[in-house]
Image: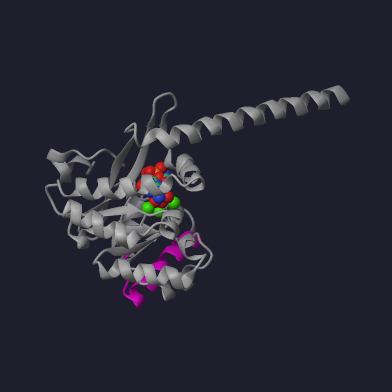
């Protein structure tokens, strides 16, 4: 009936209004989160598939919100990108990750995620130069994880920036490989040192022959281009065994270690379980 519809519409309007207000509050809070020290980095281990050795850690951002509790980066990174807060937050991530890595007992690699918005709007080579100097982290220990969406806007400029980054001695990984729409072109056009195959393929490999075929072809591609492949999202021993048989170089996932705060005293063993 008509009143029913009217009622439903006003219900949706109220819901929408609440969602907008909630988002507004979140945007406000995000703007202060850095100054209030609400961010932290967790680290997830990256291992050599053949030997099981730890080769590095990926820094993953965490926001401890005073009222909402822990908020996932999948929720707040997009907001930080829209509002521009990602520039300052991304700087904090890079500086903190590099500084913390210098305190580790072993000189493992530290992988840091770079947002496309950061890449396009900030002077990343300049920032890297400062942070490496300030922290004293050897550049070869730093690995930047970049997604394909970074290159949509201006390919020539992106290539120029990537070359500047490589000239500093920092390495580059292409993140979430396979879920984009121009993966091959990206690999051909930009100087990547590693391919991170998206977790969705790793997870499905156990049950889907299509996913297994895709993983195999990315591994073959990596081999013929001379670029090592890391498989993300390894959740089971079966998945790891498959990757070992297929000659995948590195792996990361809950089966190898969950993201956790770094324990300075027990660095290497802290995240092994
Ligand atoms: P990502 O870079 O692809 O990171 C991998 C995500 O998968 C992380 O989620 C990680 O906790 C999760 N993961 C790791 N192993 C497994 C597994 O075995 N199974 C499953 N289901 N998931 C696994 P997280 O930490 O929630 O981060 C989500 C995304 O947020 C990241 O995806 C990245 O795109 C973004 N992000 C995180 N930290 C930063 C940061 O410092 N800067 C930027 N720009 N983005 C970040
Ligand atoms: Ca990543
Ligand atoms: Ca990824
Ligand atoms: Ca992702």
Query: Is residue 20 covered in magenta?
Result: no
The colour mode here is: one colour
Q: Is residue 161 left or right of residue 180?
A: left
Q: Quadrant of residue 72?
A: top left
Question: Residue 159, percent across and down?
Answer: 41, 71
Percent x, y of residue 151: 47, 65
In the drawing, does residue 209 fall left or right of residue 137? Answer: right
Residue 100 versus residue 90: which sits nearer the camera?
Answer: 90
Looking at the magenta stretch, what is its main secondary structure?
A: helix
| Residue drawn at point x = 16 percent, y = 43 percent | 267
Is the C terminus in the top left, top right, bottom left or bottom right quadrant? Answer: top left
Specify whether residue 47 is in view. Answer: yes
* Camera-nearest residue between 201 and 4: 4
Which span is picked out in magenta? 209-230
Q: In this orientation, which residue lies closer to the viewer: 137 or 58?
A: 137
Side of 225 relative to 21 (left or right)? left
- Residue appearing at x 33%, y 49% in the figure: 91
Q: In terms of image quadrants, where is residue 36? A: top left
82 vs 228: above or below? above
Q: Quadrant of the N terminus?
A: top right
Q: Position of residue 21 (x, y in %)?
A: 58, 29
Picture residue at 38% right of the left edge, 54% below the top: 114
List x then y, in percent, for residue 165.
31, 66
């Amino acid at each position: 009936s008509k009143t029913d519809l009217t009622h439903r519409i006003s219900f949706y309007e109220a819901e929408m209004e609440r969602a907008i207000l909630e988002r507004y509050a979140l945007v406000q809070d995000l703007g202060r989160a850095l100054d209030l020290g609400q961010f932290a980095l967790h680290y997830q281990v990256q291992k050599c598939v053949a030997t099981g050795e730890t080769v590095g850690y990926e820094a993953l951002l965490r926001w401890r919100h005073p009222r909402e509790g822990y908020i996932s980066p999948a929720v707040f990174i997009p907001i930080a990108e829209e509002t521009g807060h990602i520039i300052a937050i991304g700087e904090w991530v890079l500086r903190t990750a590099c500084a913390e890595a210098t305190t580790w007992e072993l000189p493992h690699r530290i992988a840091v995620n770079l947002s496309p918005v950061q890449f396009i709007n900030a002077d990343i080579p300049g920032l890297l130069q400062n942070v490496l100097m300030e922290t004293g982290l050897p550049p070869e220990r730093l690995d930047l994880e970049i997604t394909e969406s970074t290159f949509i806007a201006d390919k020539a400029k992106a290539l120029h920036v990537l070359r500047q980054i490589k000239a500093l001695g920092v390495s580059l990984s292409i993140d979430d490989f396979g879920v984009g729409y121009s993966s091959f072109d990206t690999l051909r056009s930009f100087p990547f040192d590693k391919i991170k195959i998206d977790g969705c393929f790793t997870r499905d490999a156990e049950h889907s022959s299509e996913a297994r075929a895709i993983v195999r072809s990315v591994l073959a591609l990596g081999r013929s281009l001379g670029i090592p492949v890391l498989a993300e999202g390894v959740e089971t021993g079966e998945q790891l065994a498959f990757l070992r048989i297929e000659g995948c170089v590195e792996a990361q996932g809950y089966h190898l270690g969950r993201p956790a705060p770094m324990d300075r005293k027990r660095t290497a063993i802290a995240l092994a379980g």
